[in-house]
Amino acid sequence: MKQQKDNWVKILFSFAAPCKGKMALSVFCAILSVAGGFIPFWAVYEILLAFINQNVTLNGILIWCLVGAAGYLLRVACHGISTILAHISAYTILEGIRLKIADRLMKAPLGEVMGRRIGYLKNIIMDKVEDLEPPLAHMIPELTSNLLLPVAIFIWMLVIDWRMGLAVLIAPVLAMIPMFFLMRNYNSQYAAYMEANNHVNSIIIEYVEGIEVVKAFNQSTSSYEKFVNAVQSFKEFTLAWFKSTWKSMNLMMAIMPTTLLGVLPVGLLLVQNGSISPAELAMGIILSLSIVGPLMKATTFINEAKSMEYAVEAANELLNLPVLPDSGKIVSIPHNDIALKHVTFSYDGSEQNEVLHDVNLELPEGSFTALVGPSGGGKSTIARLIARFWDVTGGNITIGGKNIKELSIRQLSELVSFVTQDNFLFNCSLKENIRLGNPNATDEEVYAAAKAACCDEFIVRLDKGYDTPAGDAGKRLSGGEKQRIAIARAILKNAPIVILDEATAFTDPQNEDKIQKSIMALSKGKTLLVIAHRLSTIQNADQIVVLKKGRIVDCGKQKELLKRCPLYADMWKAHIGAKNWSVSEKKEVAAHV
Ligand SMILES: Nc1ncnc2c1ncn2[C@@H]1O[C@H](COP(=O)(O)OP(=O)(O)OP(=O)(O)O)[C@@H](O)[C@H]1O
């Protein structure tokens, strides 16, 4: 972390590498613009000189006016070009960072991504990266001119007379004293500000994301209070910081523009003793006044540099996520048997947090395996490890006898269809959502998959049918309907291995039949692994694996398990009890209607 902090400028330069040429040109134009900005001063000086020496002519004045105007135009044009180039570079860099982050999120183990809140990721990818735009787009042209201009003026003043040169420094040097007090705690205060900012952000995101739960559990008052407290304490923090700095800040702002207080008396003395001419004094006064604006602006970049540092570090954190090693090889797979051999796994890599212990399991090609067991036993973990969302900590997983790590991630993802209960629908039409399973599928193939997954009937009822945007449809689709769209997607993908993680979670008795039908369509002739709490949906499995606390307790057909595995028998009794209760309750309700 420390190393990242030290190197944020280096990291920024690495981000900017693709725009090196444009950035260099932008700086060059900014320098030209500064140089052009001096020409009007020079023209004024020459006109003053002519007046003082009493050799002023109309032509002479006109020429110097034209020279001054040309210099001014050069300054404006170069500044414009520099700003345009800086903006193009800034947005190209931002685009590059966002694409790199998206690429890294895709290559990182899923756990690394899912372990971070959506709000946090969005904040970095959109807001923090966007924070880089103003400094990148403005700092290059403006900071260059705002730093270069005072330096050049100082040199010019030294050339007029070294004492005048030093006199112009008096105000900026005095302004450094309150600035020193201002900057003493700046780093720690800024860090505290960012922490307060992140805190209030996370509370706001939590409030908005959890608004359904808040309303359902009547927590609106306490959640709202938490929200209000966070916003208020952020306001209090920023105001307190502002109050602690305003004296030094105002003192600095008051001293900085007083360059004339040094230049005027020194200049007058120098004119008096004949060291400089009155025209040179006049020039010195103009120059010393023109130094003020750029210096004041340069100080505002201190804040921007700090926000840039935080933005670079945040973006860099995501860019440094570990990458799931990808062999990139297409390996010949003789069959689609899956085998887990002595698999151990812990999410954080530590032994004490191991969630799977020495798991051995075989899923022959074309067979139907069900994983059951108490909550937290490791069922989903096994499913995710087969799809290689994470790598096993110990042992190995093979498909067709080949370690899944030997396969390219693309090949593995083509081999495995993974359907979970979180059926995410992208914000495109339902047809395109299904087509995600196979981007080359024709419309007819999409409709056939939808029919097989029993979703055709409810999709055609929607106003725009298959062209209904998922965003609009999503609000009107039940959990079971979204589930069937996900199954249609997987049918279209037609992968030889199918994993269903709680895919029947949204099933009600009316829906169960349809889901079962769609699952049958999906899994015909496939190696099928199903995780289900509803045991009736897996009672015909070729093998039911009972998992408890990360260990396989038993494995067999339903009948065998009912006889010999008390844990399974209890689960079955509980399930049948719940099912009967639900049916009898419905009958009772019907009788009363
Ligand atoms: N992303 C994660 N990071 C850390 N620990 C996790 C993560 N996901 C799951 N776990 C832990 O791993 C263990 C196994 O979880 P898993 O979800 O595999 O169980 P499960 O049998 O599928 O449970 P359920 O039936 O409730 O879905 C649990 O103790 C859980 O807290």
Image (spheres, grey):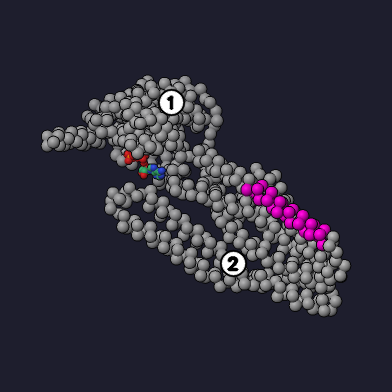
Is residue 318 among the parts visible in the rendering? yes
Mark 2 residue crowding within 10 angstroms, few (<14) / some (14–19) / many (20+) = some
Instruction: Left or right? Give the position of 329 relative to 231.
Output: right
**Location of residue 388 in the rendering, given as x and y in whole percent from the top left corner:** 45, 34
Gap in angstroms between the C-alphas marked 1 and 2? 59 Å
Residue furthest out toward the front: 58
Q: Nearer the viewer, residue 24 or 344?
A: 24
Q: Residue at x 50, y 30 (%)?
A: 410
Secondary structure, mark 2, is helix
Q: Position of residue 535 (x, y in %)?
A: 26, 32
Q: Where is mark 1, residue-wise?
A: 493
Indicate whether 275 appears above or below 318: below
Compared with 586, 349 (above or below) is below
**Residue at left offset 52%, top offset 25%:** 331
Give yes or no for residue 83 being in the magenta stretch.
yes
Name the spot of residue 574 as percent of width and height, x first.
Answer: 21, 37
Quarter of the rendered image showing ligand 1: top left
Residue on which the image places disc 2: 183
Residue 303 part of the magenta-drawn span:
no
> Which stretch is magenta?
61-87
Given residues 270 and 348, the one toward you in this image is 270
Q: In which image quadrant can residue 506 be found?
A: top left
Q: Residue at x 50, y 28 (%)?
A: 411
- For this orientation, the residue located farthest to the left is 592
- Observer able to see residue 487: no
Amino acid carrying label 1: it is: Lys
* Residue nearest the viewer, comparing 327 with 554: 327
| Residue 278 picture quarter | bottom right
